[in-house]
Amino acid sequence: MKKVTLFIAMSLDGYIADYQGKVDWLEGQGDDTENIDSYSEFVKEVDTVVMGWNTYNQIVTELSPDVWIYNELTTYVITHRECISSERINFIDTDPIELLKKLRVENGKGIWICGGANVIHQLVNKDMIDCYYITVIPTILGTGIRLFEDSNKEIKLKLLKTQCYDGMIDLIYVRR
């Protein structure tokens, strides 16, 4: 079965976006002398990315409006909006749990859960995430969109690795 990984950044106080849904605070403290690129290493392990509409919209309107940055991956955007899919981007109106059940049994590399608090919350509540790769950004937002909301059950994790660079900390956990 394909491994499902949540690869995401959050503020020190647990938010993935500010109160307006913005992520312009996603940066280190500005003194990175090690040049660590954890994203490039991670993305080699996946061939599929799953995200909600808000994450997709933020990418194409703010973060990378001129180029689809996940062109090497098959993308699934979960949305109720009527959008036309392309060869690499699939707009689907389906339950994220059902989508992952289908994708996990296909051949290939892993599945990246890229974002969308609603998508993440549903997958966490059904314990569908195998690996949590969370980068903690040295910022306290105070309010915004939380990475983890109230869950209906406890999920025990095992710490695999930590990595610190530019004031940020990568935390990599797997289910126990």
Image: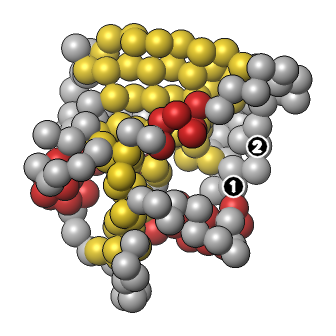
Front-most of residues 22 and 112: 112
**Residue 25 tag number:** 2
User: 45 and 64: which one is in front?
Assistant: 45
Q: In the rendering, at what x and y percent does residue 136 appear?
A: 62, 26
Residue beneath the point at 32% across and 11% down: 158
User: In the structure shown, which secondary structural element does the residue marked by tag 2 occupy?
Assistant: loop
Q: Are marks 1 and 2 in contact (CB under 8 Å)?
A: yes
**Residue at horizontal 27 percent and vertical 31 percent from the top:** 130
In the rendered view, tell whether residue 54 sits above or below residue 175. Answer: below
Near mark 1 (Cα within 10 A), the count class, few <14, some 14-19 or many ≥20, is some
Q: Say what secondary structure mark 1 lies in.
A: loop
- Structure colour scheme: secondary structure
Work out which quarter of the rendered image holds the N terminus and state it: top left
- Which residue is at 39% across, 88% downward? 84
Query: Which residue is tagged 1?
Result: 22
Give the quarter of the figure containing the C terminus: top left
What percent of the width, then of the height, locates residue 174?
A: 31, 21
Q: Position of residue 119 (x, y in %)?
A: 35, 53
- Give the side of residue 166 with respect to residue 79, left or right: right
* Number of numbered tags placed on the structure image: 2
Q: Is residue 115 above or below residue 93?
A: above
Q: What is the spatial separation of the Cα atoms under label 1 and label 2, in whole angstroms?
A: 8 Å
Q: Is residue 138 visible?
A: no
